[in-house]
Amino acid sequence: MPRDAPQSKLAATRGYGAEVVLYDRYTESRDEIGEKLVRERGALLVPPFDDELIMAGAGTAAAELLEEVPDLDVLLVPVSGAGLISGSATAAKHLRPAITVYGVEPETGNDTALSLARGERVSISVPRTIADGLQVSSPGVKTFPVVQKTVKEILLVSDDEMIETLAWMLERMKVLVEPSGVAAAAAVRHRKKDFSGQRVGVILSGGNVDREKLAEYLKKSVSLR
């Protein structure tokens, strides 16, 4: 797990009994560290996103949403390595073929948007953004082809837009969502696309944010209104 991951996330992970191996996301490779641990310990590596079963499991988010609201016209999903959106878009298109799926990335972490535009996987430097869960360099080998087939477009949001939306959701909806998890909602709230007259579904993913950071975000959100 990155050394700069939320302390609450680290504490919860250790609290469930896991051993956490820390690394620097800007200078070290998570994949290389994982492969080294597998070799040394004879362990089984569970990929974070680039795996068919992981993608299928993530797709239950969209499946459950459409069970409750079956007539959605649009679905927006945060994008990191694209496991969540791959599974969600597949499930959504199966249940409602006419639905339009959009992904949402941070402005500084637009690897999937660039990849779709170029028609092949693009790698960028680890992005600098408050959305720590979306700080990947490229979409997955297995996830990207699914995104190409099922996702209409990748929308981009700024850190400030995620902060404003996080604060709005906490104050109005009484739901705490981390910056990464609120990205899709930020795209709707800040009108990255005109969804007038359509029924729009948004996937919120993750609530890992330290109290100190949350206080900073809430204070800053006042100036963003």
Image: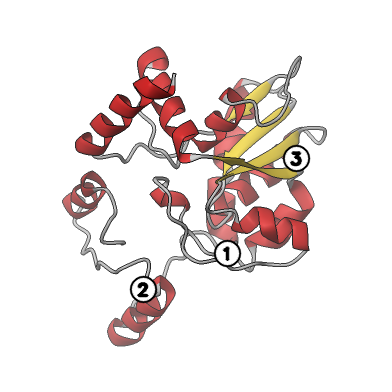
Residue occupying the point 29% across, 39% down:
209
Position of 196 relative to 87 (above/below):
above
What secondary structure is found at the residue carrying circle 3? Answer: helix
Q: Which amino acid does label 3 sit on?
A: Lys
Pick whichever, 116 or 217, lies toward us. 217
Q: Is residue 168 left or right of residue 51?
A: left
Residue farthest toward the front in the current orientation of the protein: 223
What secondary structure is found at the residue carrying circle 1? Answer: loop
Position of 15 relative to 203 (above/below):
below
Residue corresponding to mark 2: 27
- If you read the primary sequence from the N terminus, does the residue marked by circle 1 or circle 3 appear first? 3
Residue corresponding to mark 3: 93
Q: Is residue 89 left or right of residue 152?
A: left
Residue 138 is marked as 1
Residue farthest toward the right in the current orientation of the protein: 98
Residue 5 is marked as none
**Contact, CB < 8 Å: mark 1 with mark 3?**
no
- Residue 196 in percent (x, y) is at 74, 17
